[in-house]
Image: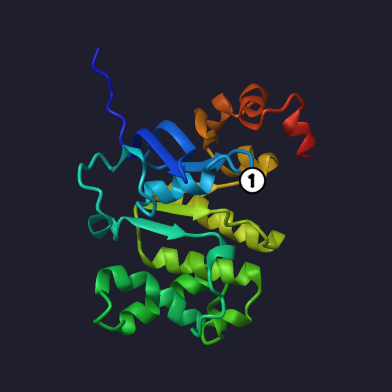
Amino acid sequence: MELKRVDYAVQIEDLTVAYDLKPVLWDIDLNIPQGKLMAVIGPNGAGKTTLIKAMLGLLVPVSGTVRFFHEADNSLRKLKNKVAYVPQSGSVDWDFPATVLDIVLMGCYGKLGFIKRPGKKDKDNAMENLKKVGMEDYALRQISQLSGGQQQRVFLARALMQTADIYFMDEPFKGVDVQTEKAIIALLKELKESGKTVVVVHHDLQTVSEYFDWVTLINIKVIASGPVEEVFHEQNLKKAYHSTGNLLKSAV
């Protein structure tokens, strides 16, 4: 019987990352299949954001490899049109003097380069993506004048401009209102249905089963990774959070 090949968006082998000689990720082995909407969950300090940054090459690991789409060459230059990243809102300088449209158009610089300016087609595409996130009426507004939820929608529109194959999002629901959260997850599910891979650092245990079809639990090491219905249960949660209580009930 011939084994069916699994197409992976990301393959991580023996990844270790340390800050000041203290490991924050240890010996990570992780395969993320293509076309999944995956949550990365774990307690504070578990290494969730570090994992995302290490996958993106924003941190230099002590050891290990990260491969995208079975490619040996994972240079950011080669991957710039395949990978999109929405960082935590708290890591962004919102006082940067730019309009909403300016920010969204930054999403096409990977294709245009920094010398060529966006044309009418790019601006039309930017407005279409702003419409998808309900922000088209704010196109000429300064980004600093928006609420946290509105800013997050704008950065999602910028990511959509990249027409990437895999999207990394670091706590996109943090600090946003219920309406914005519903709008964001609806878009992420649309991306997944179109064959894209979406990796989300997430903290609300109560919505994992509703929002995601794949989940990775980490606490410096990988505790479990797989389909939500198989690995998202109390036993694995207790291992990840070092808890003896019922975490799913307490999250209600």
From this view, report whether residue 26 is shown above or below residue 190: above
Q: Position of residue 155 (x, y in %)?
A: 50, 67
Query: Farthest front residue?
Result: 20
Query: Farthest top residue?
Result: 1
Which residue does the image show at 63% across and 39% down from the upper left? 43
The reply to whether residue 195 is in sight is: no
Q: Nearer the viewer, residue 212 or 199?
A: 199
From this view, report whether residue 85 is shown above or below residue 10: below
The quadrant of the image that shows the C terminus is top right
Name which quarter of the figure residue 39 lies in: top right
Q: How many marks?
A: 1
| SS type, badge 1 | loop
Name which quarter of the figure residue 109 lies in: bottom left
Name which quarter of the figure residue 230 lies in: top right
Q: Position of residue 166 (x, y in %)?
A: 38, 51
- Residue position for label 1: 203
Q: Position of residue 83 (x, y in %)?
A: 35, 55
From this view, report whether residue 12 is shown above or below residue 243: below
Q: Is residue 178 left or right of residue 51?
A: right
Which amino acid does the dot numbered 1 rest on?
A: His
Q: Is residue 7 left or right of residue 204?
A: left
Q: Nearer the viewer, residue 17 or 49?
A: 17
Which residue does the image show at 70% across and 40% down from the upper left? 206
Q: Position of residue 32 (x, y in %)?
A: 40, 37
